[in-house]
Image: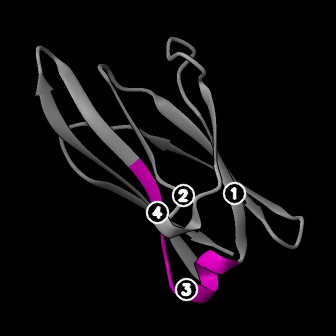
Amino acid sequence: MALTIVQTSEEAGKGYWDWEIHLEGSDDELDRVKYVEYVLHETFPDPIRKISDRSSGFQLETSGWGTFRVYITIKLRTGSEIEESLNISFDRTREKSVVI
């Protein structure tokens, strides 16, 4: 089984971007996830964001400028964790597959 981490963005003007990151997968795969923790660059207010909303695909929406690496912990209902990272890129959609 596999999930996909997806990051998209839209230019908001003056060098800023609105962007989001979420998980995609089958209902069975997403049901196995308890929450996703995203660790953003330290310049973000509250850089550690824990998302438990399964209906949104554990989506985080925010805005910013510059590129950085986001660290992702997928906490499964079994108690195990999957740790990943993704370089945020505002000029294109980014995707990364994760085996669960």
How far is the residue under mark 2 from the one under mark 3? 13 Å
Can you tell which mark lies on residue 35? 1
Rounded to the nearest whole Å, what is the CA distance between mark 1 and mark 2? 7 Å
- Between the residue at mark 4 and the residue at mark 2, the CA separation in whole angstroms equals 5 Å
- In the rendered structure, which disc, 4 or 1, sits on the residue that comes first in sequence? 1
Residue drawn at point x = 31 percent, y = 20 percent: 66
- Local crowd at mark 2 within 10 Å, few (<14), some, or many (≥20)? many
For mark 4, give the secondary structure: helix
Give above or below for 96 relative to 17: below
Using the image, tell me which numbered label, if any, was put on residue 27. 3
Residue that label 4 marks? 56
Q: Quadrant of the N terminus?
A: bottom right
Proximity of marks 3 and 4: CB atoms separated by less than 8 Å: no
The CA distance from mark 3 to mark 4 is: 12 Å
* Residue 88 percent location from the top left of the image: 38, 37
**Which structural element holds mark 3?**
helix
Question: What residue range appears in magenta?
Answer: 21-31
| Callout 4 amino acid | Ser
- Residue indicated by mark 2: 58
Q: Earlier in the sequence, mark 3 or mark 1?
A: 3
Report the residue at 46% width, 63% height from top: 56
Q: Amino acid at mark 3?
A: Asp
Q: Amino acid at mark 2?
A: Phe
Query: Which residue is farthest right?
Result: 79
Give the CA separation, mark 3 to mark 1: 15 Å
Residue 77, horizontal then vertical, whole percent = 82, 70
How much space separates mark 4 and mark 1, taking CA atoms?
11 Å
Identify the residue shown where x is 58% and y is 66%: 54
8 part of magenta stretch: no
The local crowd at label 1, few if under 14, some if 14 to 19, many if 20 or more residues have their Cα within 10 Å, is many
